[in-house]
Image (tube, rainbow, N blue to C red):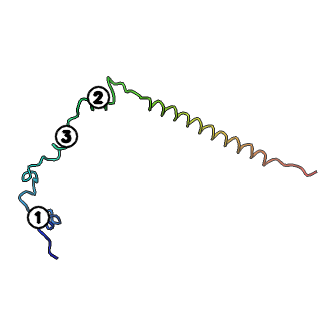
Amino acid sequence: MAFSPTAYDFFHPNAKHPVAKDPCVASNCSPLPVAAHVEATEGHESRFSGSQNGKTKVGAGGIVGIVFGLGFVVFLAMGVYHVIVARRTKMTRANTVKPDV
């Protein structure tokens, strides 16, 4: 089976090429660490900064989440308490011995 030169280069990446050491020399592209560095604008920095003077802000969504979370925990605890009490009453009723008269 015959391969084209580009296919051969694709399947044999370790072949000796003069540009194989630094591919950006021939195509004049920027190296990856330089290309990955992006400057942020002031609007993004102020919007996404988590704290100002060491204090973090909790928004309305965070407060609503905390309230619903606590409500769910209380509701779950009440359900567990109900199941425990119901089992306890069924166990005491099942163990009573009724005499035959």
Q: What numbered label is drawn on residue 15?
A: 1
Of the two numbered discs 1 and 3 on the same chain, state the one appearing first in sequence. Answer: 1
> x, y percentage for residue 92?
77, 44
Which numbered circle lies on residue 37? 3
Q: Secondary structure at mark 1?
A: loop
Indicate the amino acid at tag 1.
Ala
At label 3, counting other C-alpha atoms closer than 10 Å, the crowd grade (few under 14, some 14-19, many 20 or more) is: few
Q: Kindly report which numbered mark, 3 or 2, lies closer to the viewer in this rendering.
A: 2
- Residue picked out by circle 2: 46
Q: Residue at x 79, y 46 (%)?
A: 93
Considering every residue shown, the one lying at the far top of the view is 53
Residue placed at 56% from the left, 34% from the top?
71
Q: Residue 7 is drawn in which quadrant?
A: bottom left
- Distance from label 1 to label 3 (Cα)? 31 Å
The reply, left or right, for residue 40 in relation to residue 81 is: left
Q: CA distance from mark 1 to mark 2?
A: 49 Å
Residue type at tag 2: Ser
Q: Residues within 10 Å of mark 2 (few under 14, many from 20)?
A: few
Q: Residue at x 29, y 28 (%)?
A: 46
Between label 1 and label 3, give the one nearer the viewer: 3
Left or right placement of residue 51 versus residue 9 in this view: right
Residue 44, x across and y down, in percent: 27, 32
Q: Residue at x 53, y 33 (%)?
A: 70
